[in-house]
Image (cartoon, helix red, strand yellow):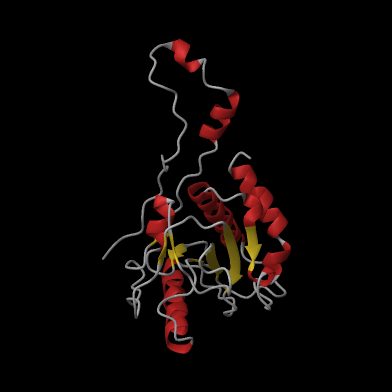
Amino acid sequence: MSVPLPRRAVLRGAVLLGAAAGAGALTQVGAGDARAAAARVDQPTIANCATWAARPPSSPVSVVQSRPNKIIIHHTAFPNTTDYSLAQAYRNSRDIQNLHMDSNGWLDSGQHFTNSRGGYLTEGRHGSLYGLLHGQSMVQGAHCVGQNSQAIGIENDGIYLDVQPPQALWDSLVWFCAFTCQQYGIAPTEIYGHKDFNSTQCPGLLHDRLPELRRTVAARLGA
């Protein structure tokens, strides 16, 4: 069985200091370059589909050979569990996939990624993690009508119509969004909620916090 990808710094796009030797080369690096290097966002641990024992898709997923241009925030509308464990995060991912495949008739989980109430991240639709780590393509999702081929969708476990999410979920969401913006070159201003595009209450009070989320993600990116 596969194991969760380890947290590590992603080097793609890192600032290069040049090949010149000696102290003179360092003086050529501007303050903006130094800030960009310091603001690199480490990769959060994201359990791939094999790790949480996902079913295989019922048919091949479609790969979009371009970068997504936004992130869309969802909540699952499942009851707010008090089990914040990793095991529960994996069970939740399986529950979502079963619902989407067996009840909705979709080929796989509709969302690209899932965030648990304990702050554990999992891959949703097969191939989403590969696309994120390489930063050049995405799989087509089924999370938001009209946006499935251009937006990364993340489900946050729970229902937030009248309560706020746990701090662990919020912190994980910030980290995930910052890393995803970095990998795909998405501006933090391009983080939206499901209700911005479809007639739904999703993602509840998380939608009211989108300005805060955008600001916090921008700060993580050094913007």
Up-down relation of residue 85 to residue 210 (above or below): below
Q: Residue placed at 40% from the left, 59% from the top?
A: 129
- Residue farthest to the front? 65
Name the quadrant containing residue 205: bottom right
Up-down relation of residue 24 to residue 1 (above or below): above
Q: Residue placed at 44% from the left, 69% from the top?
A: 124
The image position of residue 98, as x and y in percent, is 42, 83
Residue 117 visible in the displayed image: no
Name the quadrant containing residue 108: bottom left
Residue 108 visible in the displayed image: yes
Q: Nearer the viewer, residue 129 or 68?
A: 68
Image position of 29 (left or right of 86): right
Name the quadrant containing residue 48: bottom left
Q: Residue placed at 70% from the left, 75% from the top?
A: 161
Q: Could you tell me how many numbered marks the image carries?
A: 0
Image position of 116 (left or right of 167): left
Q: Residue placed at 68% from the left, 49% from the top?
A: 215
The image position of residue 103, as x and y in percent, is 47, 89
Q: Nearer the viewer, residue 168 or 143?
A: 143
The image position of residue 187, as x and y in percent, is 61, 49
Q: Nearer the viewer, residue 111 or 77?
A: 111
Q: Quadrant of the N terminus?
A: bottom left
The image position of residue 114, as x and y in percent, is 49, 67
Up-down relation of residue 124 to residue 209 (above or below): below
Q: Quadrant of the C terminus?
A: top right
